[in-house]
Image (spheres, helix red, strand yellow):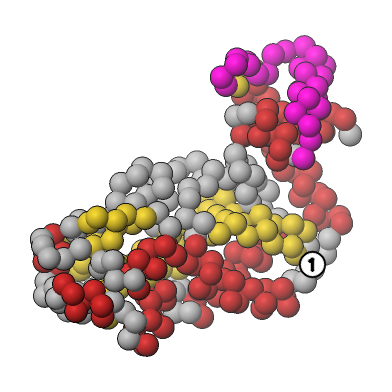
Amino acid sequence: MDRIVQMRAFARVVETGSFTKAAESMDLPKASLTRLVQALEARLRVQLLTRTTRKVTVTQDGAAYYERTIALLSELEAIDQGMLHDNSRPRGRLRVDVTTLTGSKVLIPAMADFHARYPEIEVALGVSDRSIDLLEDNVDLVLRVGRVDDPGLVARRVGQIRFRICASPDYLQQHGIPRQPEDLDAAPHWSVGYFSPRTGRAFPFTFWRDGTCLEIQGRRRLDVNDSNAYLAAGLSGLGVVQLAAYAVEEHMASGALVPLFEEWEGPDIPVHIVYSPNRYVSSRMRVFVEWVAETLKKRGLGV
């Protein structure tokens, strides 16, 4: 048993790049985790990790050992799942991270259905627009809106989101109604920008018509990086915004937001469930992915 714990401790250090983060993810004191890794190296008589005051790197022997270790640990988890749990009754804790509006507007309102189907699965749902590192943050699954360019991750497309551009009546009364997308680049109009938490750059507004794509940056004096804050800015009359249709449909129905440029179509952005290829896909992960896909389809966001 000590050997397995040592291997798990070593694997978490490799995945997080830090003894401190690895200890936190395993709910161990840092000193205890350090002793586990040192004991593993002493038993193998090889240095697996190179430690400096700034970072931890994997040696060549450590990298080779990690590849075999993670395969074994995944197989052990698969055995545990098969022996302890009937796959018809998946159970256990699932750590999931979703974007703010998709979480608050789509998944959380439907979560009672998931609990009714799978009462023995405990979901720890992180809701934010920040970029998540699955390994470093010890997350099982991430729901991402947009392309997934990391070839080191497994991504399953589970939906797509149509975006709408709109503004509040107060904004339009004060600044006038823009007649064409290019008007957003000039006075008196203002746009609210949504900037990437990762790069810090604001995404442009995107419009489609007759197979032609038009991108407009917009004249801006406010950028935010949270979709709830972005919606609030639009409702407060701070500028024109482009948001997921499901996030603004009730506000358009009530008149709190007014659609713009209806002769143009907003972009269709893919939605993916993403996980690490090194993580064993447990029965609780599988049923959650299928439930997310089904829930998005019911909301008209499926593929």
Q: Nearer the viewer, residue 111 or 149?
A: 111
Residue at the (47%, 67%) spot, across then down: 101
Amino acid at circle 1: Glu
> In which quadrant of the rendered view does residue 225 lie?
bottom left
> In which quadrant of the rendered view does residue 287 lie?
bottom right
Left/right of residue 175 with respect to residue 280 in the rendered view = left
Q: Is residue 258 above or below residue 104?
A: below
Question: How busy is the neighbourhood of tag 1: few (under 14 within 10 Å), some, or many (20 plus)?
Answer: some
Residue at the (37%, 87%) spot, across then down: 254
Where does the magenta region start and end? 27-55
Q: Quadrant of the C terminus?
A: bottom left
Q: Where residue 121 appears, x then y in whole percent?
A: 75, 64
Residue 246 in view, yes or no: yes
Left/right of residue 87 with respect to residue 139 in the rendered view = right
Tell me if residue 102 is in the magenta stretch. Answer: no
Residue at the (81%, 27%) spot, across then down: 32
Identify residue for label 1.
120
Q: Where residue 183 appears, x then y in whole percent?
A: 11, 66
Tell me if residue 28 is in the magenta stretch. Answer: yes
Q: Is residue 262 above or below residue 187?
A: below
Q: Where residue 184 appears, x then y in whole percent?
A: 15, 64
